[in-house]
Image: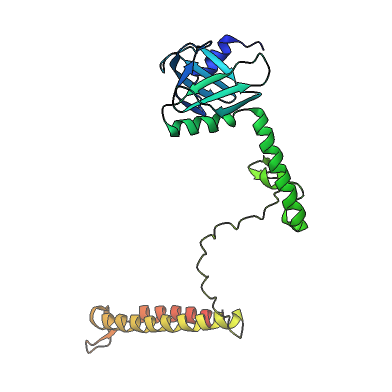
Amino acid sequence: MKLNERSLAFYATCDAPVDNAGFLHKRGGRGAGSHRRWFVLRGNMLFYFEAEASREPLGVILLEGCTVELVDAREEFAFAVRFSGGRSRSYVLAADSQAALEGWVKALSRASFHYLRLVVRELEQQLAAMREGAPANAFPANPSLVANPRPKENGRAVWSALPEQPAAAAPQRPPPPPRRRASSNGPLASFAQLHERYGLEVRALRSQWRGGQAGLAGVEGPWHPSGSGGTQTQDHSGVDCRESWHMKIERKSVID
């Protein structure tokens, strides 16, 4: 298998989250001693570095077609990654503790695509069994209709399989005041009542004004001599003219 070294180096040191990382003792080939290396698991690739701060990996192990099992070795907490085939190489690794050993064995056993296919197949079988035992309306005919909402146009969904949620209740306005009931005689009766009421006020004001004018005429009115005895009589011509004019106004208002 041909791999691009630059792409692998970038993938090994990128900022994406890793599946597992830590120090492991890696035994060299042909009886050589073990070396403590920094291992990083990303997907189905196990990278190992000389140190944790190294920017380039020393190598990579592609975890496809392999098995992870415990082995008896000089190092404690040892396990092996074995590949099928006569010429395939086995990697013997050792962790620093029992917890680290269990974590690495579990992570490496689930890293291959073969394991993912087995998990998907098992889930499909469980789903089929649930569909057979459940009623027909327990599962939607097309789950994508519920899982994926329809695209929206102008900010509103074209349609939705889920019931719409009720909108928040808007504050209600206070009820309008009750209207006044119209008179039984209609608008003519209302006008007559208004005319009578204002007519009373006008007549009262006119009476007050007449009394005031009469008092002023008795004190300040013009006097003219009359007869030989030197007696004087009051001229009421101005008052009479005003009275006749107000009488015309009163008659006109009554006629209207």
The residue closer to the viewer here, 124 or 156, is 124
Residue 176 drawn above or below residue 54:
below
Residue 111 drawn above or below residue 196:
above
Residue name at image x 70 percent, y 47 percent = 126
Q: How many marks?
A: 0
The reply, left or right, for residue 246 in relation to residue 215 is right
The reply, left or right, for residue 38 in relation to residue 110 is left
Residue name at image x 48 percent, y 21 percent = 39
Residue name at image x 51 percent, y 61 percent = 171
Residue 153 image offset from top left, x and y in percent: 68, 41
Question: Is any atom of residue 156 visible in this view?
Answer: yes
The residue closer to the viewer here, 52 or 243, is 52
Residue 159 image offset from top left, x and y in percent: 71, 48
The residue closer to the viewer here, 237 or 44, is 44
Residue 166 image offset from top left, x and y in percent: 60, 58
Q: Quadrant of residue 115?
A: top right
Residue name at image x 75 percent, y 48 percent = 128
Residue 42 image offset from top left, x and y in percent: 55, 24
